[in-house]
Image (cartoon, rainbow, N blue to C red):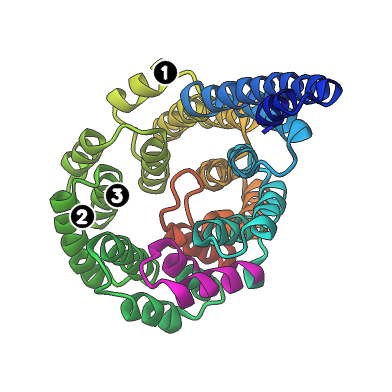
Amino acid sequence: AYRALAVACIYLGQEEEAREAMSNAVKSIKLESRKSQHFARGVYYSVYSQDYLKAASEFEALLKLSPLDVAAINNLAVCRYYQLEFGAARELAKRDLQLYPGKLVGVQNAAFYSMYANDMPEAEAYATSVLEKDQAFASSVMIRALISANREEIAEANQIYHSHMGVDDNCDALILQGLADLSIASEEAESAKDFLIRGVSLDRANENHEHLARKLLMQAELTSGDPQSLIAASLEASMSTANLMALIAFCIEHNIAPPGKAIEVARRKTTVHARVCNQMLEAVRDCATGDFGSAIEHSVKSSSLLDVWLIHYCLMFIYQRADMLLEVQDEVAICLERSGEGLCHTLDEQPSFRQLATVRRIAAG
């Protein structure tokens, strides 16, 4: 705009005004260049190297130059989310909604961040407002159902899931996973198996490898025999860090050593979440062999990298098997205090209420 103004001023013979407009144009170009550099570096650090601390620094620098840059606001919120700074992520999501109040993806993000920050009423309100406008937002369906389950209103949670079935295949696949999650939490194995069989069929048809991987692990939770073939199939579907974390939860629950292949994959990855997985896979393996001291040591190392809910869930089992009952109570208290994180895996937003239900059963004695 400044360049166009400069050209117009030249044609009108307004030399002083033309010089001022061109000076502003040069300043604008330099500013845009700096903003572009910050954004490019932020995307590189967050997407490719997954160094969320450096990425956040770049997006913060961009916002100092351009406070209304929505892309920077959203990307910074994601960084805070992966740093487990859920309150900060929620505030950034609210800032985004002030600029674009009708953006449903933004409202759904705010619902997730609020849930993880343990503000259940706010999360439920956001998710409900999304579904009032579009029934196909499966994650908002899941959030509403999980919050009902968290209130121990299991019948209502099931009703929420069932009432949104049939919108589209992707939505149905996540709903079936949610229904299986509730069924496992309620110790209704046959219902869970039925939901998972239907969900696996949809995931395979739609080539949704991440959801397929999680459902196969959930099927392994229900097998009365050797689960190794289902574990192998899950890892074949996805070797993502999120699926490795789900595998860690499964192995600690069943007190079995994780496959060597999973440990090798985690060792090769360099992101902070992968390093957390690496330490926790080692911890679970040590626990399965009775080396509780080493299992605790690996868990503490993992927590020093990133204090995810899953670490405390695993420590609860490790201390229980080591007969360290006071430490068990401490870990149970942490898991319950951070129940928003226990409802749904934070890396990929897939339902994990059954794990929180396990914590509650141990708490009840």
Question: Which comes before the other along the chain, label 1 or label 2?
Answer: 2
Distance CA(mark 2)–CA(mark 3): 19 Å
Residue 133 sits inside the magenta stretch:
yes
Q: Is mark 3 on a helix, strand or loop?
A: helix
In the rendered image, the residue lying farthest to the right is 16
Question: Which residue range is magenta in the image?
Answer: 122-143
Circle 2 is placed at which residue position?
223
How many other residues sit within 10 Å of disc 2, few (<14), some (14-19) or many (≥20)?
few
Q: Residue at x 28, y 48 (%)?
A: 217
Q: Which residue is drawn at 46% across and 57% down?
A: 355
Circle 3 is placed at which residue position?
211
* Residue nearest the viewer, comparing 12 with 350: 12
Q: Residue 117 carries which label?
A: none
Question: Which comes before the other along the chain, label 2 or label 3?
Answer: 3
* Residue nearest the viewer, comparing 320 with 135: 135
Please tell me whether mark 1 or mark 2 is closer to you in this view.
Answer: 1
